[in-house]
């Protein structure tokens, strides 16, 4: 299973798309009708977003059995709240009974200290 985000540095108001690809052979169970969960936390582990992604033709749910040549693709979107402060955020992608996958993102530019 591979997980990716379309951006690593984001701005408030952006939509960040996450893609989870499962390549066969693999067997797993993913809840219907929303097999993929997306949970986003700030650097103090405060949850700032929770959402799900629906199943579709290439994103099956239920008891899934992929052969060697098959793959399933799931996509979830985080609509970044423009009022969130800059900082590091962590996205947890949960596909049924599979282990959590974690993607770290930077919202806004990192703060730096200047010394004279």
Image: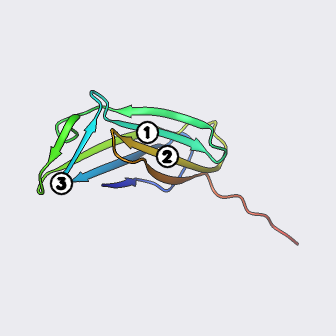
Q: How far is disc 3 from disc 2 in space, using C-alphas?
A: 24 Å
For label 2, the residue is 91
Which numbered disc flags the more N-terminal residue, 2 or 1?
1
Name the residue that disc number 3 marks: 24
Q: Residue furthest top?
A: 33
Numbered disc in front, either 1 or 3: 3
Label 2 SS: strand
Q: Quadrant of the C terminus?
A: bottom right
Residue 74 appears in which quarter of the rendering? top left
Q: Where's residue 60, x and y in %?
A: 20, 37
- The residue under label 1 is 38
User: Is residue 2 placed above or below 91 in the rendered structure?
Assistant: below
Nearest to N terminus: mark 1 or mark 3: 3
Q: Which mark is residue 66?
A: none
Mark 3 near mark 2, Cβ–Cβ under 8 Å? no
**What residue is at 67 percent from the left and 44 percent from the top?**
44
- At 34% from the left and 45% from the top, the residue drawn is 98
Gap in angstroms between the C-alphas marked 1 and 3: 23 Å
Q: Position of residue 31 (x, y in %)?
A: 30, 31
CB atoms at circles 2 and 1 under 8 Å apart? yes
Query: Please, what secondary structure does the residue beneath circle 1 have?
Result: strand
Residue at 20% x, 36% y: name it: 63
41 relative to 109, above or below: above
Q: Position of residue 57 (x, y in %)?
A: 16, 37
Give the foreground label among 3 and 2.
3
Quarter occupied by the N terminus? bottom left
Dot 3: element:
loop
């Amino acid at each position: 299973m591979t997980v990716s985000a379309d951006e690593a540095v984001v701005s408030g108001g952006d939509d960040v798309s996450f893609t989870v690809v499962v390549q066969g052979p693999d067997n797993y169970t993913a809840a219907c009708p929303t097999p993929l969960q997306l949970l986003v936390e700030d650097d103090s582990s405060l949850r700032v977003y929770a959402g799900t992604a629906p199943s579709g033709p290439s994103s099956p749910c239920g008891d899934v059995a992929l052969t060697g040549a098959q793959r399933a693709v799931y996509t979830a979107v985080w609509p970044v709240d423009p009022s969130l402060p800059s900082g590091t955020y962590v996205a947890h992608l949960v596909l049924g009974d599979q282990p959590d996958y974690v993607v770290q993102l930077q919202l806004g530019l990192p703060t730096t200290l200047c010394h004279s």
